[in-house]
Each structure stands twice: as structure tokens, then as C-alpha cells.
Image (cartoon, rainbow, N blue to C red):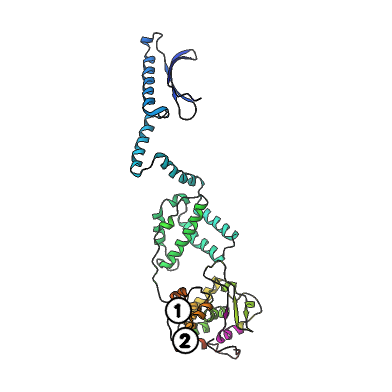
Amino acid sequence: MRKTTTTLSKVKVNGRRMWLVKWPKRGKGRNRKFFKSTSRKLAKDEAHTSAKTFFEAKLIEQRNYGTAGTSFTEKQRAEYLECAELLKPHGKTLRDAVAFYMPYLEATDRTCTPKELKAELLRVAEADGLSKRYRSDIRSRFGRFADDFDGKTIAEISTSPTDVDDWLRSLSAKRTSKLLAPAGRNNFRRILIVAFNFAIGRGYCVSNPALSSAEATEKKLAAGVLSVQEAADLLAQSDALIVPAVALGLFAGLRPEAEGLHLDWSHIDFADGTINVEPDKTKVDSSARYVEMSNNLVAWLLPHRRSRGSVFLKPTAYYDLLREARERARIEKWPHDALRHSFGSYHYGAHQDAARTQAQMGHTHPRIFFKHYRKPMKQAAALPYWQIVPLSSSNIIDMQAATG
């Protein structure tokens, strides 16, 4: 049984007479303090006087603070009282404060650097079968964050949300050094939120600083489309390697990466005039569907037709050649998602059938189509778009009306 009494006794240590005071200790064991005896006579023994004074002080402490309280030093007791006073307005105890702080200490012990987190994110993303585009975002966007915060740990960064917010606001385009547009900044923010949520799950930090950062306000713009002349010029100036991809964007509304990268020539059925779209399963708003081909789309595809193989180039090569085609076509203003937006607007304008256009584009809700992918257009203005054909159009097959 644990002893909780405070005692004063006379002992010998290595043949020397001493006075010993024992008092309770937190946990196991007891505290001891020795006083070297200075005289055989009790009345003249200064050590006994000091020991007795100390002993009586410990008895008073034990009465005032209890058995556990006697094991505190004066400094510890003062610190406890100070902390208790600070916590009092919040209705919390020192135990509450310790419970709150412990997860941070544990995360600090387990944490990693941003570069280590990036490597782990990529390993998990690949193991989970996530898209190349997603992994590319981790490499480029979170990789840039990891480079800029080199020397700090994830746990340390998580306690400084202001630093993360300032970093997002300072981001600039590498080519122009201009501050990123709101959409670009928000793309970085989304990756950071994903990364820090992953870090929390792994015990590397206890909070997500990206969630505390401000989301940039993106200006809501009407869907921008190419004019009929711009669409024709773009196709005329496109390298043969991307003509099918550009035509599929303009006249079938395919997404270049989420859908185009998965498109094989064997998915295009020239006999019944349909395209079997098998999208990237990681893109939530992309759906499997059959897209009807217009006559002019067939005309653009037939000269490049193959029995099988990828229709689209890899993203970097595709976008480089598309940029060159835009420059040759002298298209100065390039709307966001120009090819797909053009398809949606001209298809709806020609057919005046929202449900049909939505089905072609793979939208499950009309709100998305009307908010982001349609520019109001009269039918007379839309019909010429579907007459855009190669200079040599002798290989157009008679499948449906040019507006089909």
C-alpha cells in the first residue's frame, strides 16, 4: 500500500548521523531530504532544527493541498495556479488543455516534410488508380508548394494558416510573372485542401490551413464561343496531328483530357455515325454516352481514320500544337474551354432542343448546361457552323442533315 504520511526520523548514512524527512511523491516512491547532524545534543543540533522546520512545512502543505500537492515544487504550484486562472474564463481545466495539446505534440513527432508528403500522395494516387491528370496536379501544384515551404514540416505549416493564405495570394504564372487569375489560384487551393486532409488522416498534422485560406472570387462570365470564321480558320491552320481532336471538340463537344485521352479510333462507328465516349471515371461530371456525329464532323475525321489507336495526342503535345494553330489563325481572344462551349452553343442554337444538347455533352442536370456551356444564339446564326467542312469535301457521307 502506498504511504501517504510525512515523517521525520534520525538515520545513519555511511556512519554519519542525519535527519531524514520523507513525504509522498507523485506516482511511486517517496521524496527524501537529508540534513547532516551538527551535534549529538538535540538542543544544539542545527540540522535537527532545519529538518523539523522543513517537516512542519510539508505537513502544512499536505493539509492545504492534499497528498498529491506536496510533491509539487513552489514553481510548479505557481505555474499550475497561473494556468488554471487563464483557463477559468473558458470553463476549461488544465487536463482539458493537455488533452487539446497532446494531438499536436503527437503529430509533431510523426510529421513529415511537404516533399515527403508529395511523394506519399503520388504513391497512394497511383495505387488507387487515380488519373494521370490528378497525379500531374499533385506534382505541379503541390510540388510548387513543397518547394516554396522547403525546410518546414507539415505540422509546423498547419499552425500558420496565414502563411498558406499569403502564399496563395502571391502565386504568379511562371511564363508571364503575372498574378494568377482567381480560377488558377483556386485550383492550387483545392490541391492543398486535399493534401492536408490526407496529412490529417495520416497523423502528420491536426488541422488544415488551406481551409482557412480565402477562396478567390471567380468572375462569372457568359460562355465564350468562337465565331464561325474563327472555328473554320482554326481547323484550317491545325497540324494534321490534332485535326481530329479539334474537330471532335468543335463538333462533338468532347473534353480533351477527361474524354479525349480515352478515345480510340475503334470507338468511332462511321457506319451508324456515333462515338462511344468512355470518360475518365475519376471526373465526376463526365458520363459515358454515345455522341451523334454531324456530317461535317465525319468529313473532318475520315481523312485521318484508322482502325484503332489513340485519337488524341498527349495533353502537352496537343496544347502546344493548338496554341500554334490559334496563332496562325490569328485568334486573339480565346474563351475558356472554347471548343466545347462552341459546340454546346451552336448545337443548341441549331436544334433548339436543350435535352438533346445536354445528352450530347454528357450533362445530367440542365442547370450546368445553361449556366456554363450555352451562349444564346439564333438558329440562323448557328446553322453555318455545321457547314464548316474541309476544302476537299468529296468524302462526306450522306448520313443525316448537315445540322444533325
* Mark 1: few/some/many CA within 10 Å (<14, 14-19, 20+): many
Could you tell me the amino acid type at mark 1? Arg
- Quadrant location, the C terminus: bottom right
* Mark 2: few/some/many CA within 10 Å (<14, 14-19, 20+): many
Check disc 1 and report the residue beneath it: 374
Would residue 48 appear left or right of 397 to someone viewing this image?
left
**What percent of the width, then of the height, locates residue 96?**
42, 42
Check disc 2 and report the residue beneath it: 382
Residue 336 visible to the viewer? no
* Tally of numbered discs: 2
Task: Specify the farthest residue to the top.
Answer: 41
* Dot 2 or dot 1, earlier in sequence: 1
x 56%, y 85%: residue: 294
Report the span colored magenta. Answer: 286-302
**What percent of the width, then of the height, locates residue 292?**
57, 82
Could you tell me the amino acid type at mark 2? Ala
